């Protein structure tokens, strides 16, 4: 048994059969293992809060790893140098400063992601590719749920190239996909010319139709659905592609053509009774 009141310096290896207790002195290292390069060491010290702290100092005297006992905090890369954590890492608190760069996947369970910036937050979804051509996926957002044990996608938003990318020419489209059974199907495409292509019906307002499904539904059961065609010479055009005649269905009512405006229906110019 040793009861030392002064420093002990051991030049060789030392083996202890039992526990080793080092009494602390505030803000002073009570254990220090120095490397050949004497400005690099591993140390344990007690701070002013009577807590044990662990530290690793690199050869440039910068703190590269530190655990503060009284706070329960661990700091990796305390200096401005780059450091790597291998294996799974769990963060139970907030990451409040600095940037996070990951070369692999980032997974988080039971957590939300909140982003804030004084001038508005920007999210970059990038394809790391210098030869982008028509049909290449730029990025995908998948909306998923468990069924019942594995995750499946119910909705996706895909950014795609709509042509070959060259300097200052980046044709792209945004594709919205939904799923009814087990396959994602394109519902809406916003193309490089800012056109919107709907795969199904376009419904504006109420949709109480239960039989034949029109391609465009404008529903307002309180005031009546309305469609406005605006321009220098507005035209309602029927582009017939078969032998049958174009039709206007009045649901067993009259068809009236009036002289009105957007604000007033005006007088009846023509009434078709069938």
Image: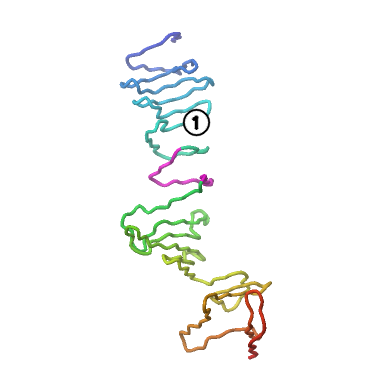
Point out residue 91 in the picture as x, y percentages from the top left corner: 49, 38
Along the line of sight, which residue is nearer the eye, 124 or 265? 265
Along the line of sight, which residue is nearer the eye, 140 or 19? 140
Q: Which residues are magenta?
A: 98-118
x 52%, y 66%: residue:
180
Residue 36 vertical position relative to residue 261 in the rendered view, above or below: above
- Quarter of the image for the C terminus: give it: bottom right
Point out residue 116 in the picture as x, y percentages from the top left corner: 52, 45
Point out residue 173 in the picture as x, y percentages from the top left corner: 42, 63
Residue, disc 1? 73
Point out residue 97 in the picture as x, y percentages from the top left corner: 48, 37
Q: Residue furthest bottom?
A: 274
Q: Secondary structure at mark 1?
A: strand
Q: Mark 1: few, some, or many residues within 10 Å (few <14, many ≥20)? A: few
x 38%, y 37%: residue:
84
Residue 104 vertical position relative to residue 15 in the rendered view, above or below: below
Magenta stretch, main secondary structure, is loop
Along the line of sight, which residue is nearer the eye, 135 or 142? 135
Q: Residue furthest right?
A: 222
Residue 117 lies in the magenta stretch = yes
In screen coordinates, is 246 left or right of 208? left
x 50%, y 17%: residue:
26
């Amino acid at each position: 048994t040793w009861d030392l009141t002064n420093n002990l310096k051991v030049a060789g290896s030392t083996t202890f059969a039992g526990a080793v207790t080092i009494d602390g002195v505030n803000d002073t290292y009570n254990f220090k293992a120095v490397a050949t390069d004497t400005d690099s060491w591993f140390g344990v010290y007690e701070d002013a809060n009577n807590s044990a702290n662990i530290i690793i100092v690199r050869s440039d005297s910068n703190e590269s790893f530190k655990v503060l006992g009284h706070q329960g905090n661990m700091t990796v890369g305390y200096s401005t140098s780059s450091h790597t954590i291998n294996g799974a890492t769990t963060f139970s608190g907030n990451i409040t400063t600095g940037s996070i760069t990951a070369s692999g996947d980032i997974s988080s369970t039971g957590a939300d992601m909140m982003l804030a910036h004084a001038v508005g937050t920007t999210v970059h979804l990038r394809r790391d590719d210098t030869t982008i051509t028509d049909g290449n996926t730029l990025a995908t957002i998948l909306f998923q749920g468990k069924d019942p044990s594995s995750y499946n996608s119910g909705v996706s938003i895909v950014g795609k190239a709509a042509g070959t990318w060259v300097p200052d020419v980046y044709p792209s489209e945004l594709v919205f996909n939904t799923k009814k059974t087990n396959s994602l199907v394109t519902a809406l495409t916003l193309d490089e010319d800012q056109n919107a292509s709907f795969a199904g019906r376009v419904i504006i307002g109420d949709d109480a139709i239960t039989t034949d499904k029109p391609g465009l539904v404008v529903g307002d059961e309180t005031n009546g659905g309305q469609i406005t065609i605006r321009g220098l010479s507005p035209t309602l055009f029927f582009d017939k592609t078969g032998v049958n005649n174009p039709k206007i269905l009045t649901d067993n009512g009259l068809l009236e053509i009036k002289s009105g405006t957007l604000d007033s229906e005006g007088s009846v110019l023509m009434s078709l009774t069938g």
